[in-house]
Image (tube, helix red, strand yellow):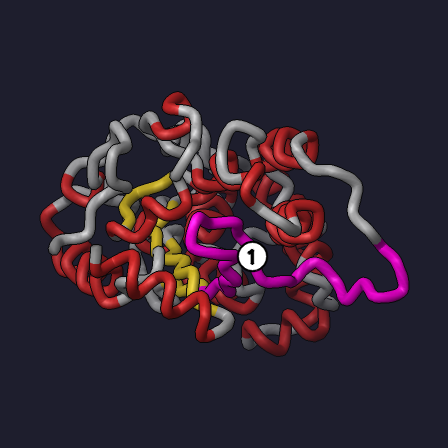
Amino acid sequence: MAPSLCRGAAVRDSLEGMAAAEYTSDTAPMTRAGTRTDFAAQLKQWRLRCRVSQLDLAIRAGTTQRYLSFLEQGRSLPGRVMVVRLAESLDLPLRERNGLLLAAGYAPVFPESPLDAAELAPARSALRGILAGHMPYPAVVVQPYGVLVAANDAFGLLTEGAAPWLLRPPLNVLRLALHPEGLAPRVVNLAEWGRHITEGLRNRVDRRPDPVAEDLIAELESYLPPPDLGPDHLGFAVPLRLRNAAGELRLITMISAFATAVDVTLAELHLEAFLPADEATARILRERADK
């Protein structure tokens, strides 16, 4: 069966035509074309955020520390190739590489195609195949901020008992997971697992300040009970323990992304699969899929 959104939910597979989404080119952080001062400030800000010295960055980008210092002081403006090399040396996401180019006065080089564009058809087909291949285990494709793009049929396991309004497009899988009217009442270890989600978001915000993400973190954290940080605490990267009519499920997550994409849209997608952490969970999921 072709991957679709969860059974019984009033949402559609948006790989062929995205439903309204919270994440758009209007909400995504993007620097507009600026001045020499704009570029200097952004370059220094990114270098410090990435915890790279001027000397290290100069070596990575094939230039001198003196020239890099001039760039950060606004005394020199780099050529387009140098901007691309600096952004690549800092390992910036494609959207931020475009932003650095704009700040230096150059046009973006990485396209941002609609997800239903013809040129992305091979990627959409590949995603469908990957989603189907993960059956009988739940798997989703999401945009930044947790906006659902597509899911396989097993995703219905994670939507059982959720309030209908949480399942309407644009469906946010992070909100669905932690909201009291979503998955949260069935999560045995909500305090720990929920903070695994919010800490992951916070780590990204520490590197790339983003008001939208910061607001989402604050919302998600408001749903969580205080964590138990006793002597047995091993951190927040713990399996999801989910109550189910057939027994408690233990699920670990695997996240995949287009590591070499040259389109902003593809680069910002990621696929998350919920895999069984034990044989009992695997058996329950297999039996559920056979019904």
In the picture as drawn, the residue positioned furthest to the front comes out as 246
In the rendered image, residue 241 lying in the magenta stretch gets the answer yes
In the picture as drawn, the residue positioned furthest to the top comes out as 165
**Residue 201, above or below 50:** above
Q: Amino acid at mark 1?
A: Leu
Front residue of 129 and 61: 129
Residue 255: x and y in percent read: 44, 63
**Residue 239, above or below 118:** below
Residue 168: x and y in percent read: 33, 26
Q: Quadrant of the C terminus?
A: bottom left
Front residue of 147 and 225: 225
Give the residue displayed 39% in from the left and 61% down from the top: 273
**Residue 67 position by quadrant:** bottom right
> Around disc 1, counting alpha carbons within 10 Å, would you say few (fewer than 14), some (14 to 19), or many (20 or more)?
many
Give the residue displayed 44% in from the left and 40% down from the top: 173
**Residue 18, above or below 20:** below
**Residue 69 position by quadrant:** bottom right
In the rendered image, residue 204 lying in the magenta stretch gets the answer no
Q: Which residues are magenta?
A: 229-254
Front residue of 56 and 179: 179
Residue bearing mark 1: 240
Give the residue displayed 36% in from the left and 30% down from the top: 167
Front residue of 43 and 7: 7
> Can residue 202 be seen in the rendering of this structure?
no
Query: With 50 as the anchor, is 233 left or right in this view?
Result: right
**Residue 73, above or below 114:** below
> Can residue 148 be seen in the rendering of this structure?
yes
User: Could you tell me what secondary structure mostly forms the magenta stretch?
Assistant: loop
Residue 120: x and y in percent read: 17, 53
Give the residue displayed 42% in from the left and 33% down from the top: 161
SS under mark 1 = strand
Q: Quadrant of the N terminus?
A: bottom left
